[in-house]
Amino acid sequence: MTGTGRIGCALLAAGVALAVGSWCGAARAAGDTVDWKRFNGQTITFLSSNHPWAQAVLKRLDQFTELTGIKLRVDTFQEAQMRDRLMTVLQSRSSDVDLFMSLKSREGLLFADAGWYADLRPLVNDPKLTESSYDLTDFSPALLKAEEFKGKLAGIPLNIEGPVLYIRKDIFARCKLAEPTALEQLPDIAAKLKACDPSIIPFVSRGAKGALAYTFSNFLHNLGGDYFDAAGKSNLCSTPGKQAMQLYADLLKNYGPPGVVNYSFLQIREIYGQGRAAMAFESSNEFGPIMQFPGRTKDSDVALLPPGPGGVSRPTVIGWGISMSAFSQHQDPTWYFIQWATSPAMQTALALDGIAPPRVSIANSAEYKAWLAAEPVRQEWSKSLDAMARTGTSEVGPPMEQQPEARDILGDELQQMILGQVNADQACAAADKQIDALVAREQHH
Amino acid sequence: MGTMAFGRSGASTAGWTRRRARFAGTAHWLLVPALAFTLALVVFPFGYTFWLSLNDYQFGHAARFNFGENYAALLHDAVFWQGLGTTFFLYFLSLALQLVLGTYVGLLLNRRLHGQTVARTILMSPFMMPSVVIGMMWLVILDPSLGAANYILSLLGLPPSQWLASPGLVVPVIALIDTWQWTPFVALIVVGGLQALPIEPFEAAFIDGATRWQAFRYVTLPMLRPTLLTAAILRSVDLLRFFDIIYITTQGGPGNASTTLNIYAYRRGFEFFDIGYASAIMIALMALVAIVVLALMRLRRSL
């Protein structure tokens, strides 16, 4: 299908979805062979995180039930608790859960190696089960790649997100400062902001040890670093690795808010939203909530983290995916739900609810364009997401099966630097040693 | 008469013995549901956890028996020993604060004062609240930038504190939050104990010229000791496996400053997928709780 054709199809489907509340009319009119009532009366179970995507989709659940007659049982938990429940179910090879939300950048390798994801590709390629308008190639290549393990398609992307720099342009103007265009300018700009208005927090980002790999990784990559060297050894003591640790820790230690070592998205959203910080490096997902604070829509700019030396910009980009359990006894009806929830029409509707769309064609839809055009800051946000999709990397922490523990090791050492307990040499050496030991343990398994 | 009495007595003894034997047989069967319940809900989980602790068992991989390697690794695990220290520091600090303040509040509540019912209701409310609510509430209050605690310090002309973000302060602050929640519970137990005390020893003490402090020190406190030990046992079990408020406020941070053994086991098991090692930590923690509770119960019996 051509690009124009895709856009046309998406627009048509979006119009149908919004006007009639049903998704499949356009595609079925084109002569598709999918029988949506084939699994009428069956029940499937969805283990969901309490995520904006899930909330937005589930409020449209009646449309799916009406279309297919399939009953969806939903168990919703906070992210950590959802993962606890999911791992217990999958470890016992239980069919209690048919589909679930999964963050591949975190648990993908472990789940894939354990054989817990069903391969969705045969279902996508089956014309009896998948509408021709579904078009898997419409998804951002980076996001789709993140859903693939050893040639198998472990999930379908649900959204696109990554850290962006929220900048208070009114404070910059008042202090007669230009917004940063290079990473190395950040400390100098933060110092000038502090001198200009001591009541303002110049810079804030994640300091909580389990959470900071998400924001730190962009510093490492823009400075030209990687978590592992060519021999597969932890590489934080390389020159860019040490520079990234030093820069990140210094910014938070010298210009961050007190208590930043406990900060994750919730505190950052509040402190920037309430107008207490001049710069916040936090997830693009927080755009909606932050812009609901009075004044932020008009006085904020949104940009990617400035590039490092030589103009290197490798933004962090991740996305939640929806996956099917390899132990599901209802794989075909489960695929119907996944297909419906990730269709072009549904993702257009979700984009208007502020869920950044993983499909390239959505950005060209009329409704979405009109929504973006209403505020300049929305366009900046969208531009940053486009750049992420094109140039980003989903490497959030050392790419290995035991990634959560590796992130924790990195977080622990960076926290100690922020607290002034160790220097960059000590922190990177300790992190490299522990991560290498973890790699060895992983290989032993 | 005596013979008759003897004869009747002999017959009735034999009957009683038969009835008792029948009853004993029935009683054994009646015990079966309770035993099955205990086996299913206590012995099996404990035994399964112990078996897991003897295995190298990572989520996503098959379990492999490793001959107690997990326990050997515990001995060389700095985070485990730090967690043990944190667990005991938090335990002793919280228990001491709660027993002292609980006794004081209990004595106040035991007096006949105006507005006592209202005061009791307000004082009891913290331990009726879910720990999640309490954790979130204190997280907001103690936030160094956004919270009310530093604002109050600034009104008093005092410098701001890092509270839960300070490695040195985090455990005492968590102990204070737990004390805020559970002191009323100890106070309730103390009030119950005070109301059960006989009045005569107090009358004798005051006739002998004892001051109020002497009556408290030499009469109330010794008689209240079994009650306080009961409160200490109940709080010990909770405090040694302290989890909820730490998980909500700091997740064991900053660094590992507030990582108790329970938090450490949770992180190893559910965040790092290392179920075998997490089970070994939990068995160590269970042994610790059992030792402390047995010691306290022995102390209580010796009174």
Image (spheres, coloured by chain):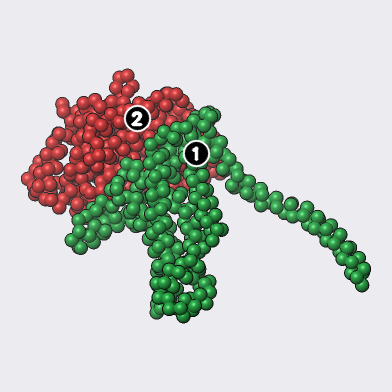
Chain colours: A red, B green
Q: Mark 2 and mark 1: span between their CA atoms?
A: 22 Å
Q: Position of residue B150 (x, y in %)?
A: 24, 57
Q: Along the line of sight, which residue is nearer the eye, B86 or A301?
A: B86
> Would you place residue A287 above or below residue B106 in this image?
above
In percent of width and height, residue A437 lies at 37, 27
Residue pushed farthest front? B208
Quick check: B127 above or below B210?
A: above
- Label 2 amino acid? Gln
Residue at the spot 50% in from the left edge and 39% down from the top edge = B279
Which one is in front, A238 or A104? A238
The x and y percentages for residue B84 are 41, 43
Foreground: A204 or B75? B75
Secondary structure type for disc 1 = helix
Label annotation for residue A434: 2
Callout 2–callout 1 Cβ contact below 8 Å: no
Q: Residue A90: in sight, yes or no?
A: no
Q: Please tell me which residue is depicted at 52% across the width and 32% down the height of the picture.
A: B68
Which sits in the foreground, A32 or A96? A96
Q: Check the image and report above or below for B54 versus B258.
A: above
How busy is the neighbourhood of tag 2: few (under 14 within 10 Å), some, or many (20 plus)? Answer: some
Say which residue appears at 24% left-offset and 53% top-offset: B161
Residue type at tag 1: Ser
**Residue underneath mark 1:** B279
